[in-house]
Image (spheres, grey):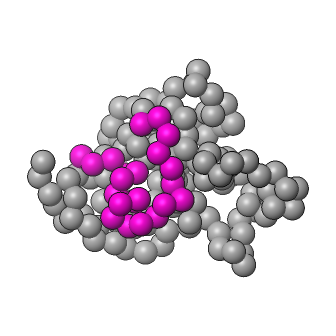
Amino acid sequence: MSTDRLRLSVNGSVHEVDVDPDEPLLWVLRDHLELTGIEFGCGEGVCGACSVLVDGQVYRSCVVPVGMLTDGHEVVTIEGLGTPGQLSPLQAAVVEHTAFGCGFCPPGMFVTGDASSEPRPPRWRWIARAAPSTWSARSVPSTSAPS
């Protein structure tokens, strides 16, 4: 396993990390940047618990090699959607309507909901679909690498 120094833009801040470029983005966010709102679910890009936004599009971070995201791409996690004093519209609606779950899947749902709130053209061919049906074991997004 080779280690490279990579620059990542996450939640509006640039970070430098020494990691294997093939390491899944999920583990870089959790273990190196200590962004633990993102969850590990299935490890196959199916369940959506690890969803993040990359340039406004939903990606399953458990199957995205971190080395693919170093060329000016912006990653947004649940921590980047809002703050306790300034919630995102979806977060505010959940609080207003007391629509809470256990806390495991909601980070991925909030990220996907934020991406679904306005149409954005896809930047890469490889995109996990941003629709409520993605939280079903029967709907499997592509897991091929971005190009």
Q: In terms of depth relative to the viewer, which is nearer, 2 or 9?
A: 2
Q: Is residue 109 magenta?
A: no
**Residue at the bottom extreme, as displayed:** 85
The mark tally for this picture is: 0
Q: In this view, does 31 lie above or below 121?
A: below
Is residue 33 rendered to the left or right of residue 41? left
Name the residue furthest front: 102
Residue drawn 50% across the image and 40% down it: 41
At horizontal 31% and vertical 52% (from top left) the residue drawn is 66
Query: Which x, y percent locates residue 6?
Result: 24, 64
Give the percent coordinates (x, y) of residue 25: 36, 51
Q: Is residue 127 above or below residue 142?
A: below
Left or right: 69 in relation to 110: left
- Decide which of 57, 46 is in the foreground and name it: 46
Q: Is residue 93 visible?
A: no
Name the quarter where the C terminus is drawn. top left
Most common SS among magenta residues: loop
Locate residue 89 relative to residue 25 in the image: left or right. Answer: right
Q: Tell me the residue at 41%/66% (across/down).
A: 34
- Furthest residue toward left: 2
Instruction: Name the residue at 51% across, 32% down.
Output: 46
Q: Give the range drawn in magenta.
A: 22-43
Q: Where is residue 109 in the image (x, y as percent from the top left)?
A: 65, 47
* Residue projecting furthest to the right: 97
- Regarding residue 79, the answer to whether it shows in the image is yes
Residue 89: horizontal and vertical position, in percent? Answer: 76, 62
> In the rendered structure, does residue 37 fall within the stretch colored magenta?
yes
62 or 98: nearer the viewer: 98
Q: In this view, does 19 lie above or below 101?
A: below
